[in-house]
Protein backbone atom coordinates (compact mmCIF):
# COMPACT_ATOMS: atom_id res chain seq x y z
CA UNK A 1 0.00 0.00 0.00
CA UNK A 2 1.43 3.38 -1.02
CA UNK A 3 1.35 5.89 1.84
CA UNK A 4 -0.43 9.17 1.26
CA UNK A 5 1.83 12.07 0.36
CA UNK A 6 2.45 14.47 3.20
CA UNK A 7 0.57 17.74 2.74
CA UNK A 8 2.66 20.66 1.59
CA UNK A 9 3.43 23.02 4.45
CA UNK A 10 3.06 26.66 3.55
CA UNK A 11 5.66 29.15 4.68
CA UNK A 12 4.55 31.76 7.20
CA UNK A 13 4.33 34.41 4.47
CA UNK A 14 2.36 32.19 2.10
CA UNK A 15 -0.03 31.19 4.89
CA UNK A 16 -0.57 34.86 5.73
CA UNK A 17 -1.22 35.71 2.08
CA UNK A 18 -3.75 32.87 1.95
CA UNK A 19 -5.49 34.24 5.04
CA UNK A 20 -5.73 37.67 3.41
CA UNK A 21 -7.53 36.23 0.39
CA UNK A 22 -4.61 36.48 -2.03
CA UNK A 23 -4.28 33.63 -4.50
CA UNK A 24 -1.29 31.51 -5.53
CA UNK A 25 -1.04 31.72 -9.33
CA UNK A 26 0.47 28.24 -9.61
CA UNK A 27 -2.62 26.81 -7.94
CA UNK A 28 -4.85 28.54 -10.50
CA UNK A 29 -2.78 27.79 -13.58
CA UNK A 30 0.35 25.62 -13.24
CA UNK A 31 1.35 26.39 -16.83
CA UNK A 32 2.42 29.89 -15.75
CA UNK A 33 6.05 29.66 -14.66
CA UNK A 34 7.28 31.30 -11.44
CA UNK A 35 10.83 32.31 -10.54
CA UNK A 36 10.80 35.04 -7.91
CA UNK A 37 13.85 37.28 -8.30
CA UNK A 38 13.72 38.52 -4.73
CA UNK A 39 13.74 35.02 -3.27
CA UNK A 40 17.38 34.91 -4.46
CA UNK A 41 20.25 37.44 -4.36
CA UNK A 42 20.20 37.60 -8.19
CA UNK A 43 18.43 40.95 -8.39
CA UNK A 44 19.36 44.62 -8.62
CA UNK A 45 19.96 45.00 -4.86
CA UNK A 46 22.00 41.80 -4.69
CA UNK A 47 20.24 40.53 -1.58
CA UNK A 48 17.40 38.16 -0.70
CA UNK A 49 14.23 40.13 0.00
CA UNK A 50 11.88 37.19 0.54
CA UNK A 51 13.16 34.91 3.27
CA UNK A 52 10.37 32.34 3.03
CA UNK A 53 8.37 33.08 -0.12
CA UNK A 54 8.74 31.27 -3.45
CA UNK A 55 5.12 31.43 -4.66
CA UNK A 56 3.59 34.20 -6.76
CA UNK A 57 0.51 35.53 -5.01
CA UNK A 58 -1.84 38.18 -6.38
CA UNK A 59 -5.09 39.87 -5.45
CA UNK A 60 -7.90 37.80 -7.02
CA UNK A 61 -8.71 40.56 -9.51
CA UNK A 62 -5.10 40.75 -10.69
CA UNK A 63 -4.91 36.95 -10.78
CA UNK A 64 -7.99 36.76 -12.99
CA UNK A 65 -6.51 39.34 -15.37
CA UNK A 66 -3.21 37.44 -15.48
CA UNK A 67 -4.99 34.22 -16.40
CA UNK A 68 -6.63 36.12 -19.25
CA UNK A 69 -3.21 37.34 -20.40
CA UNK A 70 -1.95 33.76 -20.43
CA UNK A 71 -4.94 32.68 -22.54
CA UNK A 72 -4.34 35.55 -24.97
CA UNK A 73 -0.66 34.62 -25.26
CA UNK A 74 -1.49 30.95 -25.83
CA UNK A 75 -4.00 31.90 -28.52
CA UNK A 76 -1.25 33.69 -30.45
CA UNK A 77 1.65 31.37 -29.60
CA UNK A 78 0.51 28.01 -28.15
CA UNK A 79 4.08 27.05 -27.16
CA UNK A 80 4.79 30.24 -25.23
CA UNK A 81 4.02 30.84 -21.56
CA UNK A 82 4.27 33.70 -19.09
CA UNK A 83 6.89 33.58 -16.36
CA UNK A 84 6.44 35.62 -13.16
CA UNK A 85 9.45 37.23 -11.51
CA UNK A 86 7.61 39.18 -8.81
CA UNK A 87 4.02 39.54 -7.67
CA UNK A 88 2.71 40.50 -4.22
CA UNK A 89 5.47 42.11 -2.20
CA UNK A 90 4.82 42.65 1.51
CA UNK A 91 5.57 46.10 2.91
CA UNK A 92 8.21 44.54 5.16
CA UNK A 93 10.19 43.63 2.02
CA UNK A 94 9.44 47.03 0.46
CA UNK A 95 10.98 48.78 3.47
CA UNK A 96 14.00 46.51 3.31
CA UNK A 97 14.43 47.26 -0.40
CA UNK A 98 13.97 51.02 0.08
CA UNK A 99 16.57 51.14 2.84
CA UNK A 100 19.10 49.58 0.46
CA UNK A 101 18.52 52.10 -2.35
CA UNK A 102 17.62 55.38 -0.63
CA UNK A 103 20.25 57.99 -1.27
CA UNK A 104 21.39 56.19 -4.43
CA UNK A 105 20.54 56.63 -8.12
CA UNK A 106 18.36 53.51 -7.91
CA UNK A 107 15.84 55.05 -5.53
CA UNK A 108 13.77 56.42 -8.42
CA UNK A 109 12.88 52.84 -9.34
CA UNK A 110 11.64 51.83 -5.87
CA UNK A 111 8.38 53.04 -4.32
CA UNK A 112 8.97 54.83 -1.02
CA UNK A 113 7.10 52.95 1.73
CA UNK A 114 6.65 56.22 3.62
CA UNK A 115 4.44 57.34 0.72
CA UNK A 116 2.35 54.20 0.73
CA UNK A 117 4.51 51.91 -1.39
CA UNK A 118 3.56 50.72 -4.85
CA UNK A 119 1.14 48.37 -6.57
CA UNK A 120 3.18 45.27 -5.68
CA UNK A 121 2.32 46.03 -2.06
CA UNK A 122 -1.39 45.66 -2.83
CA UNK A 123 -1.04 42.46 -4.85
CA UNK A 124 -2.03 44.44 -7.94
CA UNK A 125 1.26 44.43 -9.89
CA UNK A 126 3.30 41.74 -11.55
CA UNK A 127 6.79 41.56 -13.06
CA UNK A 128 6.98 39.01 -15.84
CA UNK A 129 8.22 37.94 -19.25
CA UNK A 130 7.62 35.18 -21.80
CA UNK A 131 9.22 31.75 -22.15
CA UNK A 132 9.55 30.05 -25.52
CA UNK A 133 8.76 26.41 -26.28
CA UNK A 134 12.07 25.33 -24.75
CA UNK A 135 11.45 27.22 -21.52
CA UNK A 136 13.95 29.95 -22.43
CA UNK A 137 13.01 33.62 -21.86
CA UNK A 138 12.45 35.56 -25.07
CA UNK A 139 15.17 38.17 -25.57
CA UNK A 140 13.88 41.56 -24.48
CA UNK A 141 17.01 43.69 -24.86
CA UNK A 142 17.81 43.74 -21.14
CA UNK A 143 17.52 41.39 -18.22
CA UNK A 144 14.51 41.72 -15.97
CA UNK A 145 15.44 44.15 -13.17
CA UNK A 146 17.82 46.13 -15.37
CA UNK A 147 17.43 49.71 -14.20
CA UNK A 148 18.25 52.14 -16.96
CA UNK A 149 17.02 53.71 -20.21
CA UNK A 150 17.64 50.47 -22.12
CA UNK A 151 14.65 48.98 -20.28
CA UNK A 152 12.31 51.90 -20.97
CA UNK A 153 9.40 51.38 -23.35
CA UNK A 154 8.93 54.97 -24.51
CA UNK A 155 11.86 55.14 -26.95
CA UNK A 156 12.23 51.59 -28.24
CA UNK A 157 12.40 52.63 -31.90
CA UNK A 158 15.39 54.80 -31.05
CA UNK A 159 16.94 51.98 -29.03
CA UNK A 160 16.69 49.79 -32.13
CA UNK A 161 18.07 52.54 -34.37
CA UNK A 162 21.03 52.99 -32.01
CA UNK A 163 21.70 49.24 -31.93
CA UNK A 164 20.96 48.98 -28.21
CA UNK A 165 18.15 46.46 -28.69
CA UNK A 166 17.19 44.49 -31.80
CA UNK A 167 13.99 44.71 -33.80
CA UNK A 168 13.08 41.22 -32.58
CA UNK A 169 13.58 42.25 -28.96
CA UNK A 170 11.33 45.26 -29.55
CA UNK A 171 8.67 42.99 -31.06
CA UNK A 172 8.94 40.60 -28.11
CA UNK A 173 8.32 43.48 -25.71
CA UNK A 174 5.36 44.55 -27.81
CA UNK A 175 3.90 41.05 -27.66
CA UNK A 176 4.15 41.08 -23.86
CA UNK A 177 2.53 44.51 -23.66
CA UNK A 178 -0.22 43.48 -26.08
CA UNK A 179 -1.40 40.47 -24.09
CA UNK A 180 -1.07 42.28 -20.76
CA UNK A 181 -2.89 45.41 -21.88
CA UNK A 182 -5.65 43.39 -23.53
CA UNK A 183 -6.05 41.58 -20.22
CA UNK A 184 -6.50 44.89 -18.39
CA UNK A 185 -3.01 45.73 -17.13
CA UNK A 186 -1.13 49.01 -17.51
CA UNK A 187 2.51 49.03 -18.58
CA UNK A 188 5.16 50.84 -16.56
CA UNK A 189 7.19 52.93 -19.01
CA UNK A 190 10.50 52.60 -17.14
CA UNK A 191 10.42 48.80 -16.85
CA UNK A 192 9.28 46.65 -19.79
CA UNK A 193 8.51 43.73 -17.41
CA UNK A 194 6.31 45.60 -14.90
CA UNK A 195 2.52 45.85 -15.16
CA UNK A 196 -0.07 47.37 -12.82
CA UNK A 197 -3.73 46.44 -12.80
CA UNK A 198 -4.89 49.81 -11.43
CA UNK A 199 -3.48 53.24 -10.72
CA UNK A 200 -1.90 53.95 -7.35
CA UNK A 201 -4.77 56.30 -6.49
CA UNK A 202 -7.36 53.57 -7.11
CA UNK A 203 -5.33 51.07 -5.09
CA UNK A 204 -4.97 53.43 -2.12
CA UNK A 205 -8.67 54.25 -2.16
CA UNK A 206 -10.11 50.76 -2.58
CA UNK A 207 -7.55 48.11 -1.55
CA UNK A 208 -5.51 47.15 1.49
CA UNK A 209 -1.75 47.26 1.79
CA UNK A 210 -0.13 43.90 2.39
CA UNK A 211 2.07 44.21 5.48
Image: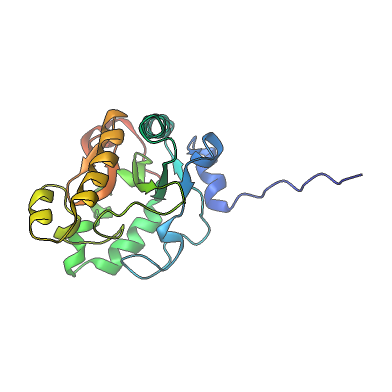
Residue 163 falls left or right of residue 4 = left
Q: Residue at x 32, y 68 (%)?
A: 45
Question: x and y percent of residue 173 in the render?
Answer: 25, 46
Quadrant placement of the N terminus? top right
Question: x and y percent of residue 75 in the render?
Answer: 39, 29
Q: How many marks?
A: 0
Residue 10 falls left or right of residue 95 = right
Residue at the far right in the pictured view: 1
Q: Nearer the viewer, residue 23 or 2?
A: 2
Quick check: can you spot residue 132? yes
Q: Nearer the viewer, residue 104 or 152?
A: 152
Q: How did the renderer colour the structure?
A: rainbow
Quick check: can you spot residue 211? no
Question: x and y percent of residue 207 in the render?
Answer: 34, 34
Q: Nearer the viewer, residue 101 or 205?
A: 101
Position above or below: 185 against 37:
above
Q: Residue at x 7, y 53 (%)?
A: 158
Question: x and y percent of residue 91 in the render?
Answer: 37, 52
Q: Residue at x 50, y 43 (%)?
A: 17
Q: Quadrant of residue 103?
A: bottom left
Amino acid sequence: MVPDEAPTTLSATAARFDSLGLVDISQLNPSIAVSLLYATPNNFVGEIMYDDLTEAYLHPEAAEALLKAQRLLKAKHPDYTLIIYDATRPMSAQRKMWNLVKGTSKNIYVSNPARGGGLHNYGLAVDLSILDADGIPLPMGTEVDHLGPEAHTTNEAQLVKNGIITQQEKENRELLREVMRNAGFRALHSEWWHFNLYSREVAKRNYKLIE
